[in-house]
Amino acid sequence: MLNQNLEQTEPLLEVIDLKKYYPVKKGLFSSQRLVKALDGVSFCLSKGKTLAVVGESGCGKSTLARLLTMIEHPTNGELYFNGQNFLENDKETQNLRRQKIQIVFQNPYASLNPRKKIGMILDEPLLINTALSKTERKAKVLEIMEKVGLRAEFYDRYPHMFSGGQRQRIAIARGLMLNPDIMVADEPVSALDVSVRAQVLNLMMDLQKELGLSYVFISHDLSVVEHISDEVMVMYLGRCVEYGTVEQIFKYPKHPYTQALLSATPRLSLNTRRERIKLEGELPSPLNPPLGCAFHARCRFAQEYCRKVQPQLQIHKDGTKVACFVAELNEQSK
């Protein structure tokens, strides 16, 4: 198997050429076409590390989250956990997958059943997946609630009785009930007030240190990504265009799209501010992607061959991976 991790360690999670295509029809008599929501994404995640996935809306971030947690099945590709194929359909693999990889959704209220009390919501994963007694399950629920900063008296309350930050703590607690190794966090703080975001992020980082969790952290907020992640994968129209450590991506971005994203990130210090790069046009439709590089119509450095040939991820001298002809030429000229 191809180890694409930037560090020379055995990966906990290995994703190879993962794809998700959706068949659609424009009309009753039209031919079927494919929306390539995810078009060949590969990465590795080590134990106790955080991989951030960033990009504009529609780039495939949330589709990737659903595939990693098997909410949806991929069209093609490979997914390995500690070397075990997690795409096998036998019952043992399915049970292990539910235990090892959990997800925290963007909207904490929508992800919690409003008709059930918090104790019942948190007890449900244990009831379905373990043989613990009712007393043991309640003890486990109260233990996890304390770990995420929820008081024991919250056990018999309904979701509508909590603030947004408390609901997200409940969602995190639910994800921890089966002692997972990997947590997929899909925009976990974007629906929260600014004053609460830091609290939830600090909680996630504390849990990572205490429990050895690995995160796939999906976000469009690059200031948050810089704070919490170890590695960053930049996506555009269902494909990875740049991949590297957080320091490499934020200090030395190579892809024009990454440079544009970082230039739009607010900075308080004059020394860290970047010249604003304004992207022209809209994100292309995944139903009708352009030929060549998908970013060429919005790229200030686009050449004629960028419109004809699709660039592949290439490893650069510093270990980053970039899918850009211009970046390759700049690297060769050094």
Image (tube, rainbow, N blue to C red):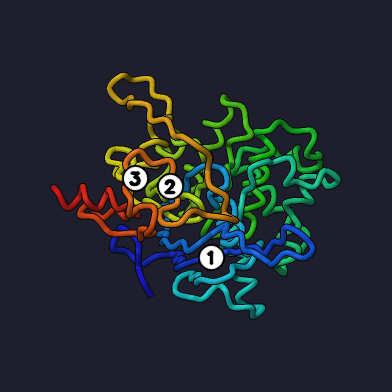
Amino acid beneath label 2: Phe
Q: Given this view, does label 1 or label 3 mark the residue nearer the observer?
A: 3
Using a 10 Å C-alpha cutoff, classify the residue at mark 1 as few (fewer than 14 neighbours), some (14 to 19) or many (20 or more).
many
Residue position marked by numbered label 1 in the rendering: 19
User: Which sits earlier in the primary sequence, circle 1 or circle 3?
Assistant: 1
User: 145 and 172: which one is in front?
Assistant: 172
Residue, x 72% and y 61% (percent of image)? 25
Amino acid beneath label 1: Lys
Residue position marked by numbered label 3 in the rendering: 302
Q: CA distance from mark 3 to mark 2?
A: 9 Å
Residue 248 coordinates in the image, percent (x, y): 29, 44
| Image: 86 above or below 254 | below
Residue 203 coordinates in the image, percent (x, y): 53, 39
Residue, x 51% and y 76% (percent of image)? 85
Secondary structure beneath dot 2 equals loop
| Image: 142 above or below 223 | below
Residue 26 coordinates in the image, percent (x, y): 72, 58
Q: CA distance from mark 1 to mark 2?
A: 19 Å
250 to the left or right of 283: left
Secondary structure beneath dot 1 equals strand
User: 131 and 197: which one is in front?
Assistant: 197
Q: Are marks 1 and 2 in contact (CB under 8 Å)?
A: no
Residue position marked by numbered label 2 in the rendering: 295
96 to the left or right of 334: right
